[in-house]
């Protein structure tokens, strides 16, 4: 621990990526060796094909996410902001593709994609967090229905605008808080924002994996059966507590003490768990199994399926940290 503290901020972040990519390489090697073993046993290969297809998909997504995380770090705050802006654009495109819109909504969508989204990330990149926190919930919320009303189409007006506003809030507002974590200024924590983002990702990943394992191994008591037969409060509690424990163990890479990290991780994992349920409800409403309109046979999913829980967890962590540590809203 003393050796880690003696390293500079850049050296600590570089060590983080060495550990991350080393862990991914070990997982990839293990998966490759397992596939070689199963080639000799045709029956075993057929039985595990569907299971390992999802594992390979998740591992591929982890490699992509790790590489993107690394690119965001080496490109600085500007590069990270642009990278997450691209993620928001792609996620919002997936969302809008599967909800009901009409030709008269085109101008509203243009404003959402090419005005609100870039302005939100521009405000984030310049660290004017006072405007960042209210721009979309206030000004975006008012602008979109005005543009829609000017199109002179009252058919399903409320439903159409609500869906567009909801997509903007999740895909743009929620996700934009991830790069905002990189830009928070803590006394004595300058240059280590990448650790805070890594803390968010690891807490959410640990909670989601634990919740998935609990769902598959324990008796289910779904609380919203028509939305998800797999979501239960027992699994949610297990996932949330696991995420809190993971965050508590990672306190040394954050500006938090152990107890503070435990509480921050708890509220973050709790938001991620319920966020997953909300996104399942939205998919049920849209009549799809996965965002991106992918086939469930291949096991492939869209970008929004990968980052949806982050869209709920990131703003909760950002505002909890800001409120607790009384960080200023302005640069």
Image: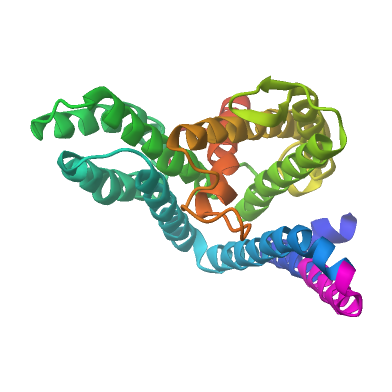
The answer to whether residue 31 is magenta is yes
Please tell me which residue lies in front, 98 or 114.
Answer: 98
* Horizontal arrangement in the rendering, residue 90 relative to residue 216 (left or right): left
Residue 49 falls in which quadrant of the image?
bottom right
* Horizontal arrangement in the rendering, residue 186 relative to residue 132 (left or right): right
Q: Residue at (21%, 40%) from the top-left corner?
A: 102
Residue 148 falls in which quadrant of the image?
top left
Query: Horizontal and vertical percent for residue 33?
Result: 87, 76
User: Which SS does the magenta portion mostly show?
Assistant: helix
Quadrant, the N terminus: bottom right
Quadrant, the C terminus: top left
**Residue 84, placed above or below residue 102:** below
Please tell me which residue lies in front, 260 or 17.
Answer: 17
Query: Horizontal and vertical percent for residue 310?
Result: 58, 43
Q: Residue at (19%, 45%) from the top-left corner?
A: 106
Residue 51 seen anywhere in this rendered image of the structure? yes
What segment is highlighted magenta in the picture? 23-43
């Amino acid at each position: 621990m003393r050796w880690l503290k003696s390293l500079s901020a850049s050296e600590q972040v570089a060590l983080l990526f060495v550990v991350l990519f080393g862990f991914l390489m070990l997982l990839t090697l293990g998966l490759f060796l397992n596939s070689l073993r199963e080639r000799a046993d045709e029956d075993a290969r057929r039985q595990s094909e569907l299971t390992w297809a999802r594992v390979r998909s998740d591992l591929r997504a982890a490699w992509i996410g790790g590489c993107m995380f690394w690119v965001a770090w080496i490109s600085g705050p500007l590069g990270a902001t642009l990278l997450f802006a691209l993620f928001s654009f792609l996620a919002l495109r997936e969302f809008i593709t599967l909800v009901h819109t009409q030709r008269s909504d085109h101008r509203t969508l243009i404003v959402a994609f090419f005005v609100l989204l870039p302005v939100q990330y521009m405000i984030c990149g310049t660290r004017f967090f006072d405007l960042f926190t209210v721009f979309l919930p206030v000004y975006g919320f008012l602008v979109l229905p005005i543009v829609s009303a000017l199109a002179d189409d009252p058919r399903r007006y409320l439903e159409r605008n609500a869906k567009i506003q909801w997509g903007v809030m999740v895909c743009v507002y929620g996700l934009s808080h991830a790069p905002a974590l990189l830009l928070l200024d803590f006394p004595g924590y300058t240059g280590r924002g990448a650790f805070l983002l890594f803390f968010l990702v690891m807490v959410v990943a640990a909670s989601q994996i634990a919740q998935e394992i609990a769902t598959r191994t324990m008796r289910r008591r779904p609380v919203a059966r028509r939305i998800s037969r797999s979501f239960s409060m027992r699994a949610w509690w297990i996932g949330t507590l696991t995420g809190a424990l993971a965050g508590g163990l990672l306190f040394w890479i954050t500006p938090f003490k152990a107890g503070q990290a435990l509480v921050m991780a708890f509220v973050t994992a709790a938001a991620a768990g319920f966020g997953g349920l909300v996104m399942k409800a939205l998919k049920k409403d849209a009549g799809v199994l996965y965002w991106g309109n992918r086939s469930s046979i291949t096991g492939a999913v869209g970008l929004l399926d990968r980052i949806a829980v982050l869209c709920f967890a990131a703003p909760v962590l950002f505002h909890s940290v800001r409120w607790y540590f009384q960080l200023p809203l302005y640069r």
